[in-house]
Image (cartoon, rainbow, N blue to C red):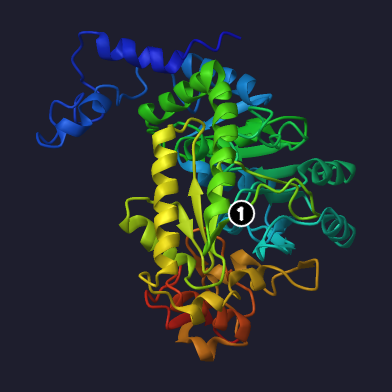
């Protein structure tokens, strides 16, 4: 295929260049009726903020330039068919659930999944069985699932319609997707992969293989996260015979806007072109460069450390993403949340933090001066910690027990006491955190980022959950999903 072309982007350029009068939506009329001051920033994008007019195709029934752009994307990412998403990977996760699950169907789900996976299962009325992840020993972070645990869960629940994993996780930890896919296929079910943070996987020898390359059936990628598309612009890839593509296309039309953003879709087209033409070479060079810098700065740090790109494989960590650096205090002198603030105060805005760690995310092409500036800031913070110029809360930083403990356990899998959808519609009442112990959660309590629910509707609330909430709050963590902003109370199911 000719990857130098970008059919949707080129069609938008033609639309902009034509002398026309806009008598169609949107109402800003190519920016002519937009706020005057804001036009300075939005001018160029408004000129191509079009709609489904002749020549621009229709996302929900593509036969022209969008269809061609999706064909090129499928070729670039190794899929049999690719769907453009303008609602992020969230839209893809919702669509996957609604396509593959009927009410009451059992789905095997990695417990440390994104909230959109649980929301999709709730909408579909599916019954999730949570496969618990292993904890990576060196970092104490919830990683991937042990293939043996998936096999055990399938033996217990042979009626399962699919398995759903996350690869990689927010920290860049990848799992053995090939073995997990093989287990699923032996059972005759598809493997769904939320690969939101792995759109660059498989695009060079220096990064892990993509989930499609090793056998996954349906893969959702946030092209905007690790590649170069605009925010929310994502892709859903399918291969094989286990995914009903016509039904999937219909569901995507349900969960996505009927007025999709053409700039977002065109950014997917251009991102694919850039990746194939020059991005793969840039990616290889960037990974090699980042590792050199990481090794050099790691030797100098006295109080901070950067996770190593370990080559050894474990049951739960098969590989790591070299475009992510995870920074932490060596001696638990400061929390990850405090370190995040120190970095931001010095002009380095990181992706996320937890109680212990801060995640720094790079792209496929990074300028030397940007890496050098970041390394200089890390060195400076390390120096100031040593000179006690940066105050930390050692008690909180030592408190390494957080959400990780809730996402793993002695068992390899658990079934929620009450199905997600049933719990969502049951009557609830608000109680204090202490009073919630032993009750069934009516809410999704989500430390964010990374967006992995600590509690989902229908799960029994334990004292360990409540202690985790309190400790994450004390350390400076932020929650989504809770009705009480201060999270001093929460909703539980009534009469249960």
At a point 62% along the width and 82% down the height, the residue shown is: 464
Q: Left or right: where does residue 21 sit relative to residue 392?
A: left
Image height of 83 relative to 477, above or below: above
Placement of the N terminus among the 4 image quadrants: top right
Image height of 41 relative to 496, above or below: above
At a point 67% along the width and 31% down the height, the residue shown is: 202
Farthest-out residue, bottom: 435
Image height of 214 relative to 152, above or below: above
Q: Is residue 185 visible?
A: yes
Placement of the C terminus among the 4 image quadrants: bottom right
Query: For residue 252, what is the image quadrant?
Result: top right
Badge 1: few (under 14), some or many (20 or more) residues near its Cα, within 10 Å?
A: some
Query: For residue 326, what is the image quadrant?
Result: bottom right
Q: Position of residue 253 (x, y in %)?
A: 50, 36
Front residue of 220/214: it is: 214
For disc 1, the marked residue is 307
Query: For residue 286, what is the image quadrant?
Result: top right
At a point 24% along the width and 22% down the height, the residue shown is: 47
Q: Is residue 428 visible?
A: no
Q: Position of residue 28 (x, y in %)?
A: 19, 30
Task: Name the secondary structure under disc 1.
Answer: loop
Q: How many marks do you count on the picture?
A: 1
Front residue of 202/406: it is: 202
Q: Left or right: where does residue 326 sit relative to residue 392?
A: right
Q: Position of residue 425 (x, y in %)?
A: 54, 69
């Amino acid at each position: 295929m000719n990857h130098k072309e970008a059919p949707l982007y080129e069609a938008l350029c033609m639309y902009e260049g034509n002398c026309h009068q806009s008598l169609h939506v949107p109402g800003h009329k190519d920016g002519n009726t937009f706020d005057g001051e804001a036009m300075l920033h939005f001018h160029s994008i408004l000129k191509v903020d079009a709609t489904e007019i002749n020549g621009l195709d229709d996302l929900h029934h593509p036969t022209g330039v969008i269809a061609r752009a999706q064909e090129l994307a499928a070729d670039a990412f190794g899929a049999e068919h690719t769907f453009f998403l303008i609602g992020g990977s969230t839209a893809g996760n919702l669509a996957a659930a609604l396509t593959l699950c009927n009410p009451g169907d059992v789905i095997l789900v990695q417990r440390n999944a994104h909230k959109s996976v649980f929301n999709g299962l709730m909408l579909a009325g599916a019954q999730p069985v949570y496969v618990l992840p292993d904890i990576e020993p060196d970092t104490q972070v919830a990683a991937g699932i042990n293939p043996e645990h998936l096999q055990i869960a399938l033996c217990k629940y042979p009626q399962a319609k699919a398995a759903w994993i996350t690869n990689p996780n927010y920290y860049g930890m990848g799992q053995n997707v090939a073995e997990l896919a093989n287990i699923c296929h032996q059972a005759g079910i598809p493997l769904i992969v939320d690969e939101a943070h792995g759109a660059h996987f498989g695009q060079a020898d220096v990064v892990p293989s993509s989930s499609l390359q090793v056998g996954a059936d349906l893969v959702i990628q946030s092209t905007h996260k690790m590649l170069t598309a605009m925010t929310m612009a994502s892709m859903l890839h399918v291969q094989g015979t286990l995914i009903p593509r016509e039904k999937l296309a219909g569901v995507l039309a349900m969960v996505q806007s009927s007025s999709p953003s053409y700039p977002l879709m065109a950014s997917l087209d251009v991102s694919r072109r850039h990746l194939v033409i020059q991005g793969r070479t840039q990616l290889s060079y960037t990974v090699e460069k980042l590792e050199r810098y990481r090794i050099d700065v790691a030797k100098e740090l006295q109080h901070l450390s950067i996770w190593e790109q370990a080559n050894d494989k474990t049951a739960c960590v098969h590989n790591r993403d070299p475009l992510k650096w995870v920074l932490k205090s060596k001696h638990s002198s400061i929390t990850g949340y405090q370190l995040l603030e120190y970095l931001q105060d010095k002009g380095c805005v990181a992706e996320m933090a937890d109680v212990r760690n801060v995640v720094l995310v790079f792209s496929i092409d990074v300028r030397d001066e940007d890496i050098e500036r970041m390394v200089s800031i890390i060195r400076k913070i390390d120096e100031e910690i040593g000179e006690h110029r940066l105050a930390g809360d050692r008690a909180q930083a030592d408190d390494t027990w957080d959400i990780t403990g809730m996402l793993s356990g002695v068992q390899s899998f658990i079934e929620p006491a009450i199905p997600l959808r049933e719990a969502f519609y049951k009557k609830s009442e608000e109680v204090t955190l202490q009073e919630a112990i032993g009750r069934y959660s009516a809410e999704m309590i989500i430390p964010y980022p990374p967006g992995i629910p600590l509690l989902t509707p229908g799960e029994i609330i334990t004292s360990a959950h409540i202690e985790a909430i309190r400790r994450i709050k004390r350390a400076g963590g932020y929650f989504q999903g809770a009705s009480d902003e201060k999270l001093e109370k929460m909703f539980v199911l009534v009469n249960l």
